[in-house]
Amino acid sequence: MPRWKQSALVKSENRLGIAMLSPSLVLVGILIVLPIVLNVILTFHYISAYNPRKFEFVGLQNYLRLLSSEVFWSDFKASIIYMFGSIVLQLSLGLALALFLNQEFAGRNLLRGVVILPYIIPTVCATFMARWILDPGYGIMNFFLTSVFGFSVNWLGDPKSAMMSAILVNTWRFFPFVEIALLARLQTISPSLYEAAEIDGAGGCKKFLHITLPELTSVIFVVALLRSIWAFNDFTLMYLLTRGGPMNSTEILPLLAYREAFENSNIGMGATVSVFMTLFLVVTFGIYYLIFDPLKEA
């Protein structure tokens, strides 16, 4: 085929590809890019929830007020504790269960199905179940503690235990996601790698550190990133579980954004909080990328 015909064919294929991608790009622009741009614009205005059509330009006032607010920094600290506490526990528990369920034993398939139950339960149902379990008066946790050890804990009513309780509920709710992802990767690791390690005299600990863990790095990166994003933006679970209490000890940034936008009737400030959350997650992505380096094998 002459070179000019090949060039014309390539150009024709490129035009076809662009034409086929255009609807998706337009949809992404409408559903993702446009709301982000609008949200940034809102941060420079005061907009009352009672009169959302009236935009009052305030410049950087929302940003300055946010960064000088003690409540914001307290909620930011609570968000970091909630996010990283949940991620550490979910990765630890998910990895341990994935390693266990990757072994051969009777009833393994049944146990694999049971483990994912917390993840498939709707968040509202799971949160109300957790509130019942942790209730200081008739919850099963305090019933057990009182019967066995003779004391009880006000799980959601004490600022010292409320955040820990929220982290544990979040971990119980979402660790199956981590377990499923890691188990899927474990099943694709070639057994010959472990056989070669055994011939070289490597024990179980060395095989885990030098074979299993490096093979799981890319999956751990994706799982940690996704769970960090979801935990940092976790409005539903925390709102239903504690509503930010007691004494704002569990108020995280999504709750602050909601309170500013709707309870305090300042949509612009709520948008400012969400922009800060987005910037923080971008930085978190960079940190995770440096730690896990998912492209190092490429």
Image (cartoon, rainbow, N blue to C red):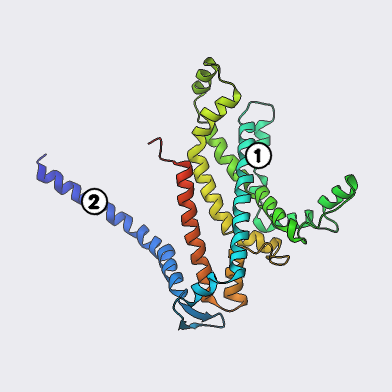
Q: Is residue 4 left or right of residue 216?
A: left
> For residue 19, which quarter of the picture?
bottom left
Q: In this view, does 156 lie above or below 87?
A: below
State the mark number for residue 78: none
The residue under the point 78% across, 53% down is 133
The residue under the point 60% across, 59% down is 79
State the mark number for residue 113: 1
Q: In this view, does 153 lie above or below 60?
A: above
Q: Looking at the image, which is closer to me, 160 or 56? A: 160
Q: In which quarter of the image is the N terminus?
A: top left
Q: Do the residues labelled 1 and 2 touch (CB within 8 Å)?
A: no
The residue under the point 87% across, 51% down is 151
Residue at which label 2 appears: 14
Name the secondary structure under disc 1.
helix
The residue under the point 45% across, 51% down is 286
The residues bearing labels 1 and 2 have C-alpha atoms spaced at a distance of 46 Å
Residue 47 at what x, y percent from top left? Answer: 51, 80
Residue 140 at what x, y percent from top left? Answer: 83, 51
Name the secondary structure under disc 2.
helix
Residue type at mark 2 is Asn
Q: Looking at the image, which is closer to me, 64 or 201? A: 64
Q: How crowded is mark 1: few (under 14 residues within 10 Å), some or many (20 or more)?
A: few
Which residue is farthest top?
Answer: 199
Q: In which quarter of the image is the C terminus?
A: top left
User: Which sits earlier in the primary sequence, circle 1 or circle 2?
Assistant: 2
Q: Residues within 10 Å of mark 2 (few under 14, many from 20)?
A: few
Residue type at mark 1 is Gly
Residue 201 at what x, y percent from top left? Answer: 55, 16
> For residue 158, which quarter of the picture?
bottom right
Residue 3 at what x, y percent from top left? Answer: 10, 42
> For residue 21, which quarter of the picture?
bottom left
